[in-house]
Every structure is written in C-alpha cells, then in structure tokens.
Amino acid sequence: MQDFSKLFKKALNHMPNSEQEWKDKLTPEQYKVLRQKGTEAPFSGKLLHEERDGVFACAACGNPLFASTAKFDSGSGWPSFDQALPGATKEIPDTSLGMTRTEVVCAQCGSHLGHLFDDGPTTTGARYCMNSVCLDFGEGEK
Ligand SMILES: [Zn+2]
C-alpha cells in the first residue's frame, strides 16, 4: 500500500494531550466540530467539490483517512465516501439527539469526523458523511 503519510507536512510529531492544546492548534470552527462533535453547515465545506486524485486526512493529526477514489457526491452537502482506508477510522454507536447513528472518529487522535450510514449507493453500501472542516486534502502522485 502507498505510504500517504509523506503527503502531509502537518502530520504530528506531538499529539496534543489537553483540550487547551487542541484549541491552540485548531481554528475555532475545527475545534467545535472535531473536539466537540459539532456539525458544519451543509454545502459550506471547501472540500465538498474536491475532484482531484489524492487522499483526505484528519485535519487534527494528519492521519490519512479516505482515498479520493472512495469519494462520491451524495447530494447531502457534506463530503461523502463509500469506504475508509483500512484501520483509519473508528465507528462508535451514537444515540445523541434521540437518533441511533454511528459516529466516525479518527483512529489515531479520536477526533470527531462525521457519521456513517448504511444507505450508500455503491457496492460497499456505506456512506461516510464527513465534515469538510475535519479533512485536509493532499494531492497524490499520478
Ligand atoms: Zn486524527
């Protein structure tokens, strides 16, 4: 498998170990979504229409999460993927807001990324509904 880690200059040497460190490192919008499980407004994300080849990584720690080949347009207003890179994410049952959903977090730093639904249009059946603000894009080599 391709080593995506080199694509990300922001990959962490030092993982923040307090919420104050995360606050200093992230923008207020990123902090709200990544660390406080917020949701960005639909159709607001800068990566929603990213069409280049490459990989999407965790904006908090640089962990590669999704290949561009897994991205599809779900019409939801959030970047959507039909599968994550192996071991990149963790899925956690989420019963907040009176709904039963599956929360997706970064396997490396535990930051909130979005939710996983089982109504995806491709053969995987999965729809990873991600917040654009939680992702960084690195263009891959051709
Ligand atoms: Zn992370």
Image (cartoon, grey):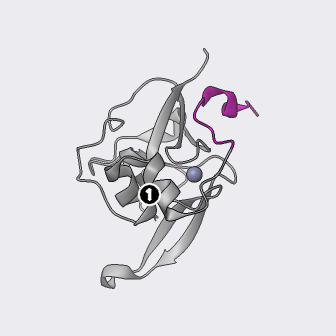
Question: Against 69, is 87 above or below?
Answer: below
| Number of marks in the rendered image | 1
8 is within the stretch colored magenta: yes
Residue 103 seen = yes
Residue 120 seen = no
Question: Against 28, is 5 above or below?
Answer: above
State whether the magenta stretch is mostly helix, strand or loop. Answer: loop
In the displayed image of the protein, which residue is found farthest to the top? 142
Q: Where residue 51 appears, x then y in whole percent?
A: 40, 27
In the displayed image of the protein, which residue is found farthest to the bottom? 98
Front-most of 45 and 9? Answer: 9
Residue type at numbered disc 1: Leu
- The residue that appears at 58% across and 22% down in the rendered structure is 140
Tell whether circle 1 marks a residue whose Cβ is less than 8 angstroms from ligand 1: yes
117 is within the stretch colored magenta: no
The crowding category of the residue bearing disc 1, from other C-alpha atoms within 10 Å (few below 14, some 14 to 19, many at least 20), is many
Q: Secondary structure at mark 1?
A: helix
**Residue pointed to by mark 1:** 34
Point out the stretch of residues depicted in magenta.
1-13
Q: Where residue 108 appears, x then y in whole percent?
A: 65, 55
Q: Where residue 113 appears, x then y in whole percent?
A: 46, 56
Quarter of the image where the N terminus is located = top right
- The residue that appears at 52% across and 48% down in the rendered structure is 60
- The residue that appears at 48% across and 60% down in the rendered structure is 20
Quarter of the image where the C terminus is located = top right
Q: Is residue 55 left or right of residue 121?
A: right
Front-most of 23 and 71? Answer: 23
Q: Is residue 28 left or right of residue 135?
A: left
Q: Is residue 64 left or right of residue 87?
A: left
Where residue 64 sits, quadrant-wise, is: top right
Q: Where residue 32 appears, x then y in whole percent?
A: 35, 59
